[in-house]
Image (cartoon, rainbow, N blue to C red):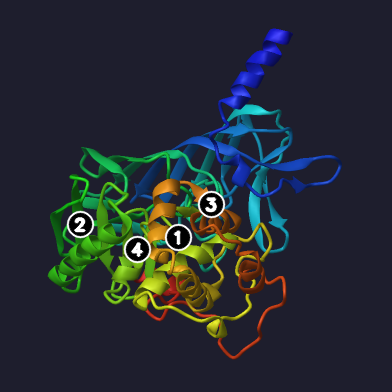
Amino acid sequence: MKLLVLLFSVAISSFAFANLHQAPPNLDFGNSTAGVFVDFKTAKSVLTYNFGTREVLAETTVEFFQPVKGMPIFDLVSEPSKVLIDGLEASTQLTSMDGVSRVRFINKVLEPGLHTLNVSNEVSKNVSFSSTTVRSAFWMSDLSDRRYMEQYLPSNLEYDQYQTDLEVKIVGTDREHQINTNGSISELSKNHWNITYPAVYTASSYFYHLFEKGAYPQDTKIYKSIDGRDIPVIVYTNQSVSRFMNETLKALAELEADYGPWPHAQVIIYGAGQGGMEHCGATITSYSALGHELIHSYFARGIMPAHGNSGWVDEAIASWRDGGYPGYSSRSLSRTDMAGHSTYQRTTDRDAYTKGMRFIGHLHSKLESQESFKVFLKSFFTERKFKPFKTHEFKAAIETFYSTDLSSEFDLYIYGKKGVDKDHEHKHENPHHPKLSEQELFNLL
């Protein structure tokens, strides 16, 4: 018995590197039953586009670790057609998280340890069939709830990182298609691919766009990183490919000079002509938002928010860059609760683009006699690359770097502990970064 306990303890300790410490508190389902946040180890999905039925079916297998007894939590917006847990049929339910979001849980109490989840579901969002072609994309948003990978495939929340393998098949058409994606892709046969996404990816990291070959003008160039790597830069757009490419190469040189080597294996730019959303080394963007989206590959998809209350940091930094890194006095600041929402918050507070940006500029003014805040940001990025973080960790890193205490500033302007200013400045996104409706996103397929 002692040996079994020891082995179990060793098994538990082997997961110490996982991100369960960044998960929100487990949910109380009553009757001494907990809804338990888990650690995905791997996810493998087969995605089949079927012209006979004009459906997209997904079959996903997730290996996950559950730290304590209870009902495991994951998320999937659509209702699954079939669920197995450890080989046995199961059901799922949706539940509220403090009234700010919802998640899905398995209706079965599981013991701590490793488990296998199998889920079948239909993917119907951002899919368009014609007679011989299909277009599909994993469009995402940080401004609306449950708009990451969970819209399409079983996923965990943003705190978790895990490798995803995706097999994609198109059946029932001879028309050749292609996929632009920020994973390692191999073509198995015509209209049949395998994609492996890095184990550092979170639910908001993925870029995936499927369309018929030749649908968009496209160009690829090699960017020589300051660390010596050859980084492929793929630009595709119905606008000017060369204009997007030239601006991308210019922005890459700027960002590497400020923050170090590009952190991803590639750069993918879909010049959609409107909107903007960041992914790991990839973006859907307008021309005016291109630089804003590219810096997000350092701050948002390089260092990663663990939940909505830390999402303000990267939008504030990107917006600060958009304005030319200005300084601000305390008279320019407003009291906000950008990081003071429920711990279950999954969306970014839109005050980040304006009030958050000015707060970052204020820190720069306050601390630049020691060192530019851009130098701190480079240090923070280098030390925490591909590690989800929360606002208190960002604050602690600033305080350590500058040997100062910023508790009063964060309490007043970020956590909302002294109230929130109700002024006439409406919450809005960056003017180059508007939130698109679901129909507008569908039109960009």
Q: Circle 3 is placed at which residue position? A: 389
Callout 4 amino acid: Ile
What residue sits 33% from the left and 57% below the top? 259
Say whether disc 1 or disc 3 marks the residue closer to the N-terminus: 1
Residue sitting at the far front = 369
Q: Kindly tell me whether residue 175 is visible in this rendering.
A: no
Residue at the disc numbered 4: 295
Secondary structure category for the residue under label 1: loop
Q: Where is residue 360 in the image (x, y as percent from the top left)?
A: 48, 71
Tell me the crowding category of disc 1: few under 14, some 14 to 19, or many 20 or more residues within 10 angstroms, Cα based: some
Q: Quadrant of residue 406?
A: bottom right
Q: Determine whether label 1 and label 3 are within 8 Å by CB.
A: no
Q: How far apart are marks 2 and 3 (CA)?
A: 29 Å
Q: Quadrant of the N terminus?
A: top right
Q: CA separation, marks 1 and 4?
A: 28 Å
Q: Nearer the viewer, mark 4 or mark 2?
A: 4
The local secondary structure at tag 3 comes to: strand
Mark closest to the chain's N terminus, 1 or 2: 1
Please say if the residues under marks 3 and 4 sit with CB atoms less than 8 Å apart.
Answer: no
Mark 4 or mark 2, earlier in chain: 2
| Closer to the eye: label 1 or 3 | 3
Looking at the image, tell me whether mark 2 or mark 3 is earlier in sequence order. 2
Give the spatial CA distance, label 3 vs label 4. 17 Å
**Mark 4 surroundings within 10 Å by alpha-carbon count, few (fewer than 14), some (14 through 19), many (20 or more):** many
Q: Which residue does the numbered mark 2 point to in the structure image?
A: 234
Name the residue type under label 3: Phe
Q: Residue at x 61, y 70 (%)?
A: 409
Compare marks 3 and 4 and give the one earlier in the sequence. Answer: 4
